[in-house]
Amino acid sequence: MQFFSLEGNLALQNVLSRMEVERQKIASTQKKGYFFIGGGIILAITGILMGLIGLAIVVGLIPIIYGGVVFYKIGDELQAYKEAYKRDVIGEALRFLDASLTIDPYRGILAQEFIYSQLFSTDPDRYKTEDLVCGKADKTGFYFAEVHAEYKTVTQTKNGTRTEWHDIFKGIIFVADFNKNFNGVTIVRPKDFGSAIGAWFSKNLFSFNNKDVIKLENIDFDKAFITYGTDQVESRYLLTPAMMERILKLNSNSKYSISLSFIESRMYIAFPLNRNYFEAPIFKSLLNPELLNEDITAIKFMYDIVKELDLDTRIWGKN
Amino acid sequence: MIIAIILIAIFLFGIFFYNSLVGKKNQVTNAFSAIDVMLKKRFDLIPNLVEVVKQYTNYESETLSKIVELRTKVAAGNISDAEKAQIDSQLSSSVKGLMVNVENYPDLKANTNFINLQTTWTESEEQIAAARRTYNAAVTDYNNSIMMFPGNLFAGALNFHPVPVLETAAEERRNISAKELFNN
């Protein structure tokens, strides 16, 4: 994988040097804030332990409030710094990869589209999305965004009800225009014990929905994924032996198992990730390329999917 | 009482087993008809393809007449499935040869109609491949049911017999030799 090099990009180096001054200012102000809040808490606890409760509250509260004010005052600057990082640093790195790539920190993949993609069987109760990156690799348009979808469970307890939130998905959803025409729906989900039993049940006894389990002839693919589709022939038309090999390779390059769906001439891929990408560092130097490289690697990985899955080969009557 | 329960269980199992075999056999028939539909779609492309190619080339008449002849055989309708598969395989290799020779005719190569036909042909090739794979998956599923225990005990008596999977024609299986193609 080709890494993005800071040395060759003077414009980006200048932006980073300018922003590094801003980052240092924010970092030192935040450290000051933490220092006062921490000090206030220690003073309050010491006072309470010594039995001087009234004095402890007064002496402890002043630095805590001051710390809070420090954080509040730097809030706008912090927000502007984070935005500038996405716009100027990530944006510039994207342009370096391909002039068509753009990032919009305030847009993402809508919850309706997430549900519509059928990548996951549970609908979200809480949904967050940000950092929409759009681009075009020759004829193939694509976009991806960070998504965090959760569902809630409510349990009855002695004191009332308890609401708990559980992840449906946290990571990046990648969407690309697929290079073949199709009408139905094909879904490829990672195989785990529960889904394997569900698949056996729907194949041998009764299917609860309009999708069949598609048994594919690639043994490794069949071990890694369960495929459902509305049309057996069409699903195999999309998942050719070559495409299955490419998906397996893509899956092996991803830390966690991916899910895919083919709907309305689009291909959706969900990459579970456990870190938030494209966020500006506060307590780490911007001039250290490691953090930026991780973001760039993620973007490059997404950008290369079109090539990896050969989506730009337009010989099947779809332009 | 216990005997009655066992008998009912065996009876219910028998119904389930029989129905599942019928379902699987129907899937095989259904999958085969999908191949048939795809083949028809491909055969229907031939007249257009021949027309377009004819306008630009004078040298491929032998290949074209062979393609037309094969298509006429299919259109006659009274051929078996095996014959149809064989004709398709012959057609496929003739058209493949034609597509390679198109390199010699820049005007034809740039013709929009021809480009459309070429992409539709490629599309149909992969659709037929998908239909064949579906058929083989259905046949394997059906064959497994009647050849594995306990299916093997009753399948014969119920008149269910194994169905052969579709194999690639020897002609298609052969690796394409670039030397051979360019020597023609």
Image: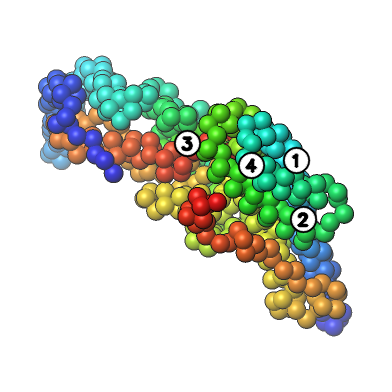
Question: Which residue is labeled 1 in the image?
Answer: B44
Indicate which label's residue lies in the foreground, 4 or 1: 4
Q: Which chain does the numbered disc 1 sit on?
A: B
Question: Which residue is labeled 4 in the image?
Answer: B60
Q: Residues within 10 Å of mark 2 (few under 14, many from 20)?
A: some
Q: Amino acid at mark 3?
A: Asp
**Residue A314 in picture, x, y percent from top left:** 53, 36
Secondary structure category for the residue under label 3: loop
Q: Which chain does the numbered disc 3 sit on?
A: A
Q: Quote the CA–CA distance across marks 3 and 1.
A: 28 Å
Secondary structure category for the residue under label 4: loop
Q: Amino acid at mark 4?
A: Glu
Q: Amino acid at mark 2?
A: Lys
Q: Quote the CA–CA distance across marks 2 and 3.
A: 34 Å
Where residue A312 is drawn, which disc sits there?
Answer: 3
Q: Are marks 1 and 2 on the same chain?
A: yes
* Observer-nearest of B2 and B17: B17
Indicate which label's residue lies in the foreground, 3 or 1: 1
Going by the image, does A205 lie left or right of A298? right
**Residue A73 in picture, x, y percent from top left:** 21, 16
Q: Are marks 2 and 4 on the same chain?
A: yes
Indicate which label's residue lies in the foreground, 2 or 4: 4
Vertical relation: A311 (above or below) A214: above
Question: Which residue is labeled 2 in the image?
Answer: B84
Q: What coloring was used for the rendering?
A: rainbow
Going by the image, does A31 lie left or right of A120? left
* Observer-nearest of A319 and A62: A319
